[in-house]
Image (spheres, grey):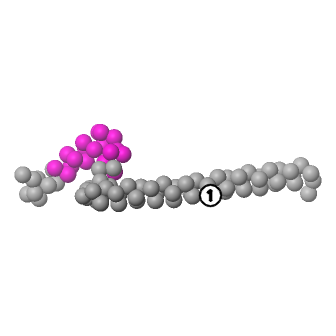
């Protein structure tokens, strides 16, 4: 193996190690944030809020307006077809 290929392999290994270490740090941060989110839901539940509904609202707010409108229209149509709409 010549010096150039050894240096190339060494640089690739260093880059790989750096990527892995960055991912590991981000995974640790993600776990911490997930714990924080769980704490907020627990606090909300302690104040009488339904966490299932809160999770649904968070999910809905992530989608854009047009997507939500389309889903709500289809839901209403299906509910009418099943005699569930008022």
Res 81 visible: no
Residue 86 location (% of width, % of height) = 6, 52
| Residue 56 versus residue 69 in the image, above or below | below
Highlighted range, magenta:
59-76
Q: Which image quadrant is residue 9 in? A: bottom right
In x, y percent, where is residue 62?
Answer: 36, 45
Quadrant of the snapshot with the N terminus: bottom right
Residue 14 visible to an observer of this rendering? yes
> Relative to the observer, which residue lies in front, 2 or 52?
52
Q: Say if the magenta span includes residue 62.
A: yes
Q: Report the residue at 32% width, 45% height from top.
A: 61
Task: From the viewer's perspective, tell me whether residue 56 is left or right of residue 9.
Answer: left
Compared to 38, does 62 lie above or below? above
Instruction: State the image quarter where residue 70 is shown.
Output: top left
The residue drawn where x is 51% and y is 59% is 31
- Report the residue at 73% width, 51% height from top: 15
Q: Residues within 10 Å of mark 1 (few under 14, many from 20)?
A: few
In the image, taking residue 70 as reference, residue 41 lies left or right, namely: right
The residue most toward the right is 2
The number of numbered discs placed on residues in the rendered structure image is: 1
Q: Is residue 60 magenta?
A: yes
Which residue is pictured at 86% across the width and 51% down the height? 7
Identify the main secondary structure in magenta.
Answer: helix
Q: Is residue 30 left or right of residue 81?
A: right
Place of residue 52 in the rendered image (x, y in percent of width and height, measured from the top left): 28, 59
Q: Nearer the viewer, residue 59 or 35?
A: 35
- Front residue of 18/10: it is 18
| Residue 80 x %, y % | 11, 53
The residue tagged 1 is 24
Disc 1, SS: helix
């Amino acid at each position: 193996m010549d010096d150039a290929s050894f240096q190339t392999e060494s640089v690739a290994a260093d880059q790989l190690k750096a990527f892995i270490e960055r991912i590991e740090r981000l995974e640790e941060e993600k776990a911490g944030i997930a714990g924080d989110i769980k704490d907020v839901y627990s606090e909300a539940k302690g104040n009488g809020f339904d966490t299932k509904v809160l999770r649904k609202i968070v999910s809905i707010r992530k989608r854009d307006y047009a997507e939500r409108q389309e889903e709500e229209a289809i839901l209403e149509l299906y509910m009418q077809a099943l005699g569930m709409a008022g």
